[in-house]
Image (cartoon, grey):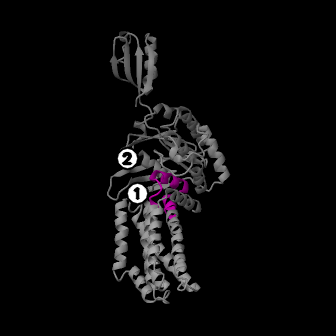
Amino acid sequence: MLLNGVSKRYQLRGPLVLRDIECSMQPGTLTHVQGDNGCGKSTLLRILAGVTVPTRGRITGLPARVGYVPERFPPGLRFTVRQYLGHLGRIRALPDRLTAARSGELLDLLGAPQIADTPMWELSKGTSQKVAIAQALVADPAWLILDEAFTGLDRSAQLALMEQVRACRNAGGAVVFTDHGQRARARALAPDSSLVLVAGALQPQETAPLERVMLVVLAGQPESFDVAGHPGVRHIETTSNSILLHVDAEDCDAVLAKALQNGLSVRCVESVG
Amino acid sequence: MSALCRYQLAGFLRSQRWVPPLLVYVLLLALVYADASGPAVPSYGVTAVALFPVAAWVTRTLLSTEDPIARQITAAAARGQLRVQAALLTSAVIAALPLVVLAVGWAALANPAAVHGWRTWLGGLGIHLVFALAGTGLGALAGPPILHRLGAAVLGITTVTLLSIIIPASPVAWALRVLEHNPRHGFTTAITPSIAFLLSITAVAIFASLATARRS
């Protein structure tokens, strides 16, 4: 899977939504695409899914079995869940029986077992999201594109989806996902690589690792620990009995060890970007 | 491809958006055959030319029935927008076939004396099919991904239909004249150039729609 100088504009003289994207994805890997709203993430994922053709540049090596979960699943489809999944299975040239068995299994795993005969327009947002995920996974895709697929799902469905993503990767499939705001979940999935988009262009990898700055909250007497001199500390706020720090991720452990040595206790550690 | 057509036609049937064009066409047939005298062929002319905007309407509606996001999922499963668009246009032709049969069948029932012999039957089916195809081409130009706005599409279909009837040199007006003035024969020979011209414009329109879908 190779993207070669891929650019995209939607209108003839419109702005470039993506600019000269160069990247590659190997089988059996998980790629996290990051970026702010409107930076071109969804467009990149649509190109990867083969749904949109780049205006300039080339994409090569797209696998045949593609599973795509779009950012928002439309609410008004005029089919029951079983009919919709059946149609999409036939479009993928899967045997009806296989589609029925696999999609039933997937809806079970996602915690929506009894919806096969429910009309799609009666489903809640989260439940239709589960149908969207089921249609993508039915074909055991070699190439899985998840655009904010975790948002709107309940906790157990999120875990089930994470399990499916791992299974897909372990079976030699390539997975690309976006997951806005939820760094903890992205970390739990342990992506093999991470792409950061800023205004349609790919950021160089070195300057944009998955987590860079950690927020640390310590409780105790601020005077007992001269934190300002410690390497990696970027920002300090103190009250009479607590310290709030922003620390570079690579120095975080050292700062925590020093703080514990000095009799402070750790209240909170989390990634802030 | 057949699975894609089946999915699109099922969605179109369930949307019930085919009802207005069908009703309009049925009304027109009822008006044309209210007085059941006269030869079948001039009536064929009117009912065939009427299929031009009606088939365009059906096509435009079919092209815009599936939700854009659902279409992305379909395109990913079908491996590309080109196949989805080709299936939609094929479905539009399939959806126009009942109208073709309805028009010729109505003529036969209303005027059994004039519609006799396989030549009249075949000629009737043929001329209606030609205008149904031409209408599909017009609808392809008036629908996504070439034209997204409904207002512009309605205006476009109406204007093209009116102009093609009014302007004497247009293949539609030409076919209409030939059918009126040669009620008994001349179906195949005199009308061939205008049909060929009409079908080649249609081919260009279909190609434009497919090419735009592929690049979208």
Q: Please state which of residues A174 and B211 is positioned toward the viewer in this rendering.
A: B211
Residue B8, horizontal then vertical, whole percent: 53, 59
The residue beneath circle 2 is A200
Instruction: Please indicate whether residue B25 sits to the left or right of residue B153 in the image.
Output: right
Q: Residues within 10 Å of mark 1 (few under 14, many from 20)?
A: some
Tell me if residue A186 comes above or below residue B69 in the rendering.
above
- Viewer can see residue B196: no
Residue interval drawn in magenta? B62-86
- Looking at the rendering, in which quadrant would you find the N terminus of chain B? bottom right
Residue type for callout 2:
Gly
Residue beneath the point at 43% across and 37% down: A180
Residue B66, horizontal then vertical, whole percent: 48, 55
The residue beneath circle 1 is A56
Mark 1 element type = strand
Evaluate if marks 1 and 2 touch, with contact meaning CB atoms under 8 Å apart. no
Q: Chain of mark 2?
A: A
Mark 2 element type = loop
- Looking at the rendering, in which quadrant would you find the C terminus of chain B? bottom left
Residue beneath the point at 39% across and 65% down: B142
> Separation of disc 1 and disc 2 at Cα?
14 Å
